[in-house]
Amino acid sequence: MIRPEIGVTTFLNSAEYKPWPCIFKEKYSDFIVLEVLSDGTCCKISDGSSDVVPGKKEVKEVVMPSRLSEEDKEKLGQLKELGEVLISVEGWTKDERRELHEYVRSLGPYDSKVDGQQIKAFKPSNVGRKRKFWPRDVPEQLHFTLSKADYETSYAIGLISKFLYRTPDSFGYCGLKDRRAVTAQRVSGFHVDALDLLALNSRLKGITVSAPKYEDKRLSLGNLWGNRFEVALRQFEMYNDEGLKDRIDEWSNNGFINYFGEQRFGSFSISTAEIGLKIIQKDYETAVNMILEPKENTKGSIGDCLKTYKETKDPKSALKQIQGNLNHLVETYVLKQLQNTPTNFKAAILAIPRPQRSLYVHAYQSKIFNQIASKRAEKFGLQVLPGDLFQDESKLVTDSGDDITNVVLPLPSNKMRIPQNEIGEWYKEIMDKDKLTENDFRDLHKDFAVTESFRNYVAKPRDVEYDLIGYNDRESMLQSAEPFAKVADGELQKPEEGKYQALRVNFSLPSGCYATIALRELLRVDLSKSAQREATANSRDVEPSE
């Protein structure tokens, strides 16, 4: 509940509320996340069985060439990471080579050309060009709803791309959704046939695709309003002297500190924010050593790899410990680069794919935001101050009567605009303590996706709904998430009839807000994974009294 290491230390409402103990995410169906699009449309979970396929002209079917070896198939599957691959076509006929060219182009924004007795597959600069075999009057992107239960978004996309003979970067989406949850979100696929897509529902388990529609634009991060959350909190304990309605109304009306949640910082003992600070300070050697430090919860061959590197400082020996395909891990990227350039630690950091290496710097920025937000809440609460920054990122408040939900705080950057008040002085103090200046952020845009950015200090849950329910069987599904989880008739009872009690609360949050942070303000309990694992284990040892 109090996490000083990431700057989460207080609450927006200073009232001495008692904690409401509960079990969070005991089952994946206890946490349903429905993406809300920019037009306000909320995605629906569906198995696609009643969908009408959008019409389009016949598209030439592109099949995987039969002469591809397993090694070549694996290389093409890693085309995004590798940038380009070479496939030997010695002895292939003209038609077989043509099939390979067409297959490479069907994988996404890729092209191919002859290179001696090989064909080179690569990503060209003119990635937006039309494919000859796709009808001109049909938009190139197929938008559809991806529903999943207890899977990562990236895993689901990877599986779909494999079955459709595409690469994962042929697909776009607005954001990652939780793994331990039932979720629905819109996804776009480049040159994907709607019939082929819907046919996957007979092969996928725990994943469904539905509501296909051809569109012109690819979906990308941030193309959404936010998310609708449907949460069931098991073994909910509410004290008689605390009114449920009053407390939820206060939460709904005033909101919560819009902290970055623990997901932003990773789950390892070594803080990603501290690694980010070292990168900003250009202390790349320390950053590399922190990344490669053995971690308590890292097991298997990658754990052996990190231990070997710590003992020997030999990247080659460390990499020999890795078993299986772990090329996608941050540690692997770093060690492979160190093998080539042992003392170039900056190159080792830059060998990590840009989205992943950017997370370290973003974690540092997020920690500073959290620290400033905590200090502001403790000293000023819901007050709007002269000199505050507005949500439009260009206007300074001159009247302290403005709505607190319009006030934003900056994340540290090269061109950071700070509030012209005491809050702005706090930023300067933290930067001085960390021995940073704005110039230290100047070169980070290209390599670490750092730009001027603001975040609302306070956020409010919208369209809040709630109820109390009773249940006797701990294995009961407390809310329906068909086709993944169906509540049987008669399974739910009135609160007074059940041995256990649950609070179900539904609410919507804008993009970038964390449901766990919102619920933390309401419940005043620790919802972190480690705390909830302990709470779940303890609850199974204690049966409620009759």
Image: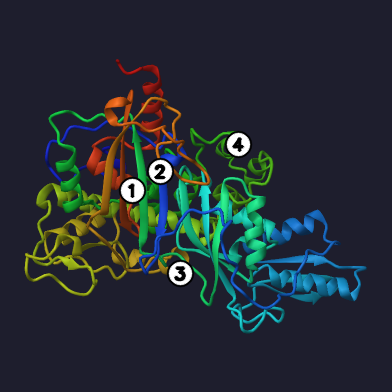
For the residues carrying marks 4 and 3, which lies nearer the camera in this image? 3
Instruction: Name the spot of residue 503 as percent of width and height, x first.
Output: 30, 37
Q: Sequence-wise, which precedes: disc 4 or disc 2?
A: 2
The crowding category of the residue bearing disc 4, from other C-alpha atoms within 10 Å (few below 14, some 14 to 19, many at least 20), is many
Query: Which residue occupies 60% across, 51% down?
Result: 328
Which three-letter amino acid code belongs to the residue tagged 2? Phe
Considering depth in this image, is 262 or 334 the residue closer to the camera?
A: 262
Could you tell me if residue 285 is visible in this image? yes
Q: Are marks 1 and 2 in contact (CB under 8 Å)?
A: yes
Disc 4 and disc 2: Cα gap in Å? 40 Å
Instruction: Name the spot of residue 446 as percent of width and height, x first.
Output: 46, 69
Mark 1 falls on what kind of element? helix
Considering depth in this image, is 131 or 230 the residue closer to the camera?
A: 230
Mark 4, residue position: 308
Which three-letter amino acid code belongs to the residue tagged 4? Thr
Which three-letter amino acid code belongs to the residue tagged 1? Ala
The circle drawn on residue 515 is 1
Q: Sequence-wise, which precedes: disc 3 or disc 2?
A: 2
Disc 1 and disc 2: Cα gap in Å? 10 Å
For the residues carrying marks 4 and 2, which lies nearer the camera in this image? 2
The crowding category of the residue bearing disc 2, from other C-alpha atoms within 10 Å (few below 14, some 14 to 19, many at least 20), is many
Q: Sequence-wise, which precedes: disc 3 or disc 1?
A: 3
Q: Furthest-top residue in view? A: 546
The circle drawn on residue 446 is 3
Say whether residue 432 is left or right of residue 203: left
Considering depth in this image, is 437 or 462 the residue closer to the camera?
A: 462
Query: Which residue occupies 29% across, 61% down?
Result: 411
Instruction: Name the spot of residue 476 as percent of width and height, x first.
Output: 44, 31
